[in-house]
Image (tube, helix red, strand yellow):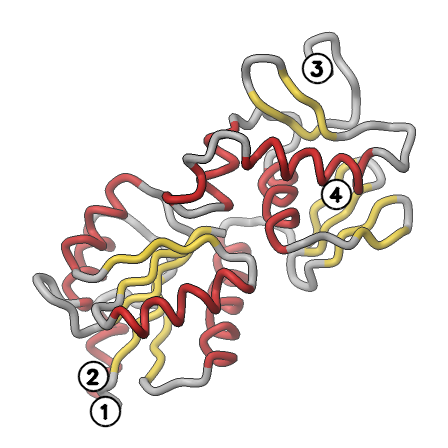
Amino acid sequence: MRVLVVEDQQTMANYIKRALEEQGYAVDLAFTGREALDWTDVVDFDLIVLDVMLPEIDGVTVCKTLRNQGNQVPVLMLTARDTVDDRVVGLDAGADDYLIKPFELKELLARLRALSRRQSVNSAKTSVLTLADLSMDTTTHIVMRGGNIINLTAKEYAVLECLMREPNRIMTRTEIAEHVWNYDVYNQSNVVDVYIRNLRRKIDDPFDQKLIHTVRGAGYRLMAENDNETI
């Protein structure tokens, strides 16, 4: 899941980024409102953490602009202002939730999980993804195959979720990388191949039926049946 953190205080921004990455999120940073809008013009984020007080363009205006553009990405707004009127302004601008600074990190993470679940419901995405005897519970993050729990790292889980969201469709390396890593990381050409190899070792090697397939010259796909184009 890819998150844009918009915060002009670099220490705070880096703190949030590190915490989210430890939870398996892919995080990009913007330090001004203009940078935030530039990012959203070229990247489809799953969540945005948006500070209100920003240089160039304030967070309320950024949120209004996104909504006027038809961008419905969930927005968690951060602010040091704790009056009811301030919260109302942010919510009326289109923010989905509001968190007052200073905040506990565990509350930030809980709010983002809640927004993610809400987005999944609104998109009619089931919380349990299945293919053949492989299942993924996106609420508990439990992955099972053949009745056995498969232990995955946060990034392995994110790569598998990307494939399970669209079974049978060929996903390019770039598509997978953009979903899982931030801009700086996904330009490393072999990072997706490394994680696919790790997933095959855990998901496919112990079983006769192989689910992760390489499509020569195109990418990868998750499917229950073999075909002549895959290896």
Disc 1, disc 2: CB below 8 Å? yes
Q: Which amino acid does label 3 sit on?
A: Thr
Q: Name the residue under label 1.
A: 83
In the shown orientation, is residue 125 left or right of residue 229?
Answer: left
Q: What residue type is labelled 4?
A: Thr
Q: Which amino acid does label 2 sit on?
A: Asp
Q: Residues within 10 Å of mark 3 (few under 14, many from 20)?
A: few
Q: Residue 103 carries which label?
A: none
Q: Of helix, strand and loop, which one carries label 2?
A: helix
Residue 214, quarter of the rendered image = top right
Q: Of helix, strand and loop, which one carries label 4?
A: strand
Q: Which of marks 1 and 4 is nearer the N terminus?
A: 1
Q: Of helix, strand and loop, which one carries label 3?
A: loop
Taking depth in this image into account, of 160 and 97 the one nearest to the observer is 160
Q: Name the residue under label 2.
A: 86
Q: Name the residue under label 3.
A: 230
Q: Residue furthest bottom?
A: 83
Q: Which residue is drawn at 14% across and 54% down?
A: 34
In the shown orientation, is residue 163 left or right of residue 25?
Answer: right
Q: In this rendering, which labeled residue sits more in front, label 3 or label 1?
A: 3
- The image quadrant where one finds the C terminus is top right
Taking depth in this image into account, of 88 and 183 the one nearest to the observer is 183
In the shown orientation, is residue 116 left or right of residue 221?
Answer: left
